[in-house]
Amino acid sequence: MIVGPETSDDAGAVRHGDEALVATADFITPVCDDPERFGRIAAANALSDIYAMGAAPLLALNICCFPETAPLEVLRAILEGAVRVVKRAGAVLLGGHSVRDRELKFGLAVVGLAEPDRLLTNAGARPGDRLVLTKPLGTGVLVNAFRAGRLGESEFDPVLREMERLNDTAAALARRHHARAATDVTGFGLAGHALEMARASGSVFHLHAERLPVHDGFEAMVKAGVTTGATRANRESCAGAVDLAPGLAPERVELVFDPQTSGGLLVAVPAEEAESLELALRAEGHRAAVIGEVLPGEPRVRVA
């Protein structure tokens, strides 16, 4: 075993000959009304763990939790959407497994390949590194706003497009700019995943709240009272290890704990590479930003 559970990484890895086999599993509940699009997003979300480790997807298996009452055409559309994304990632879908469930859930188990000495893990960040985020935040609140009928389809569509976006290009650019560590920002929110990296790397992660990229409409929905059930849980799980600057806007506090679906990569790169990585990501259509730096000290996250 090369990477196990000790560092809270996105996937595990074992050595197999001269290569590393990287394995993960992830599944989610629907984030939109279009079943085919949900399949694409769920697949991109699962594949993201492989990209966050610096690996290339090799094969995938469906994880299907389907209600007996769901129309077959809906279930078929979910699977077709996932197949399209797996093929786009250059991997193959071998099959999978289904169980009856009252709540629909879908995702993938994924295996990828990497060079063992080029794996990106949570533990590689070093003091002086800069932190780059490759996608905007805010999907948790905006999914709930759409479900509640407070956000229209045209306003929600850009959020769905970002969730469909694979992290393959972002990961390739991160490696090209000598990334030392990476994770994908998903259910634990930015603060939770940054804290996992900070602890594994033995460093302080200092985040600049005003630099965080955010989906349009997020702040308006927060001001209108929209939140998520996981936001409070995320904040409570980080209690005592995330320092929030006095006077930080409530919308920014909500943002750092907002649970993401198929979020971007949080990447630690040498300081001299950060600006060029941000520019390269933006040239590829990513709403990326340099959002902080790694400092020496007792592992924690500071947001100011």
Image (cartoon, rainbow, N blue to C red):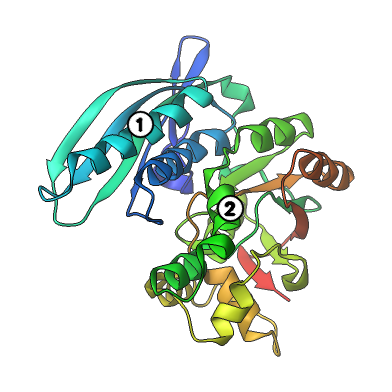
In three-dimensional space, the C-alpha distance between marks 2 and 1, rounded to whole angstroms, equals 35 Å
The amino acid pointed to by label 2 is Met
Q: How many marks?
A: 2
Q: Residue 193: horizontal and vertical position, in percent? A: 54, 57
Q: Nearer the viewer, residue 291 or 61?
A: 61
Q: Residue at x 72, y 36 (%)?
A: 174
Q: Residue 241: horizontal and vertical position, in percent? A: 55, 72
Mark 2 secondary-structure assignment: helix
The image quarter containing residue 110 is top left
Q: Nearer the viewer, residue 264 or 200?
A: 264
Name the residue carrying label 2: 197
Number of the label disc, if any, that sits on residue 80 = 1
Q: Residue at x 49, y 86 (%)?
A: 225
Q: Nearer the viewer, residue 243 or 66?
A: 66
Residue found at the far bottom of this picture: 247
The amino acid pointed to by label 1 is Glu
Q: Residue at x 30, y 44 (%)?
A: 106
Number of the label disc, if any, that sits on residue 187 = none
Residue found at the far top of this picture: 17
Query: The N terminus appears in which quarter of the rendering?
Result: top left
97 left or right of 299 in image? left
Q: Residue at x 51, y 68 (%)?
A: 152
Instruction: Please say if 195 is above or below 180.
Output: below
Query: The C terminus appears in which quarter of the rendering?
Result: bottom right
Q: Earlier in the sequence, mark 2 or mark 1?
A: 1
Circle 2 crowding by C-alpha within 10 Å: few under 14, some 14–19, many from 20: many
233 left or right of 194 in image? left
Q: Nearer the viewer, residue 293 or 199?
A: 293
Q: Residue 258: horizontal and vertical position, in percent? A: 52, 68
Instruction: Please say if 212 is above or below 4.
Output: below
Mark 1 secondary-structure assignment: helix
Residue 117 in sight here: yes
